[in-house]
Image (cartoon, helix red, strand yellow):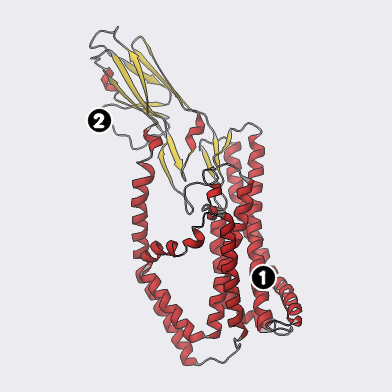
Amino acid sequence: MFMVKEEFSNIKNLFKVRLKMAKNQYTTLALVFTGLFLIPLTSNINNVVSNTANPYNNISDMSEFILFGVIIGIIVSVIIYRTANVKLSVFPQTNNSRLISSLMINYFTVALLASLILAMYLINLGIFKLLSAFSFDIFFALNINFRFIIAGFFVYITYSFLLVAIIELIGAVLRKWTYYAAAILTTLFILLVVNFVRVIEYLPRVLSFLIGEPSLLLFFLKAAGLWLGITAVTLVINRYTVFYKSHNQILKKGIVITCIIVAAVIIVFLPGVLFEVSYSSSESYWGDSFFADENISASFEEFTIDVSHLPAGSRINVEGININVMEPGQWVWSSGDYSAIVSGADSLYNIQGDTILIEYRPAWLLINGVEVLKYTNQQLSANLEGSTLYLNYTRDNVHVMLMPIWNLARQFDYFKDMGVLGTNMLGFTSGGNSTASLWISVE
């Protein structure tokens, strides 16, 4: 039999002991999460209550950041696996019970982290929903869909479990065939670094059967089958692993030298390929995302004012509150405190036409694909009184909340077009012009 009855009892006892051993780590984790939660929350509440001019508050999706932490944590647990087992050597155990209890503590930690992320999001949501009830002009740019929130929670756990299983499989292989596996993995790692750009290009295609699966049900079925298969292979390999061997010192030195070589390769090649990827991404981003945005180009408005009653050569002055009237040859590097900038006002100094044409483009600001200034109710009025053109541009002081969660769960057709996520899965992008623009001409 692969497992006997006593092993189930061993697994349970070892899991409890591992929980006690991890008490300090969980305490540290709780403190880190408290800081990650309270610091931005305090800042965002202050922005809203003090009614700052910043029109948006971006509350980052912590699930992505935490996922990288999970990967590092699991790698560390694999590295110290034997050390931890030495501490547990006084308890009844087998290879199976040791590994399964280790897997269980890792899966428990992953589920705990996902629950903390969800709790942070719901508390943030509850606080700002409460503040919005007190007329603080708060708008939620992303729709709140609890089906997505629940589904995303399990999708996140699924991806995390798969990462745990893969890393534990690598750990089992290294423990079973230490030197051969280290040599092969080191070679593969060097090849990945040297061909980093191609890896970034082709890896999504290789994994598309899972990360590109548009059906939520099929995703879980595929992930469950993959997870079970990886775990089964890990258990089989681990069952025949011999622990606590004495290691040949020459081979140890060889491993150290190999690691140094790998580090050197990373230092030499990785910055260059990362720059190439970054440059390529930037080129694509600027070419497709901002300047080709149809909504922005379509946002121009026109105002016309009849001046046929004025004699040719008349001069019209332009006045307005918080409006900067550009003089000929003037170049504005910063809009400063102005809400709008007027160009072409010099065409009014010597009128040669019957109509004043004002082309107006409202201010726009894209944050992760969300146009936040559409909530500000921008208005422009233009009135000619005597020889003075009065321009009045106004917009409301609002607080637009960007609160994404579970960015990993953006692949499913069911949640597309629901407005629950921004355009970017990783990072933060912004662009636009926070100042309205007016162009004046006479026809």
Q: Quadrant of the C terminus?
A: top left
Instruction: Give the labeled residue for mark 1.
Output: 105
User: Do callouts 2 and 1 mark residues in contact (Cβ within 8 Å)?
Assistant: no
| Point 65% across, 37% down: residue | 131
Report crowding for label 2: few under 14, some 14 to 19, many 20 or more residues within 10 A (C-alpha): few
Q: Nearer the viewer, residue 168 or 88?
A: 168
Across and down, in percent, residue 285 comes to: 37, 49
For the question of whether residue 69 can be seen, the reply is yes
Please tell me whether residue 227 is drawn above or below residue 411 in the rendered image: below
**Amino acid identity at mark 1:** Ile
Query: Where residue 110 sits in the image (x, y, percent)?
Result: 63, 64
Q: Examine the image and state in which quarter residue 107 appears.
A: bottom right
Q: Nearer the viewer, mark 2 or mark 1?
A: 1
**Which badge, 2 or 1, comes first in the chain's sequence?**
1
Q: What residue is at 64 percent from the left and 53 percent from the top? A: 118
Whole-percent x, y for residue 314 in the image: 26, 11
Residue marked by disc 2:
329
Quadrant in which the N terminus appears: bottom right
Nearer the observer, 155 or 127: 155
Q: Is residue 59 visible?
A: no
Q: Which mark is residue 320?
A: none
Residue 371 in percent (x, y) is at 47, 38
Left or right of 132 in this view: 386? left
Q: Amino acid at mark 2?
A: Gly
Specify whether 239 is left or right of 252.
Answer: right
Q: Secondary structure at mark 2?
A: loop
397 vs 345, left or right, is right
Q: CA distance from mark 2 to mark 1?
A: 68 Å
Residue at 32% from the left image edge and 20% from the top image edge: 357
Q: Is residue 250 above or below residue 105?
A: below
Q: Residue at x 60, y 41 (%)?
A: 46
- Mark 1 lies on a secondary structure that is helix
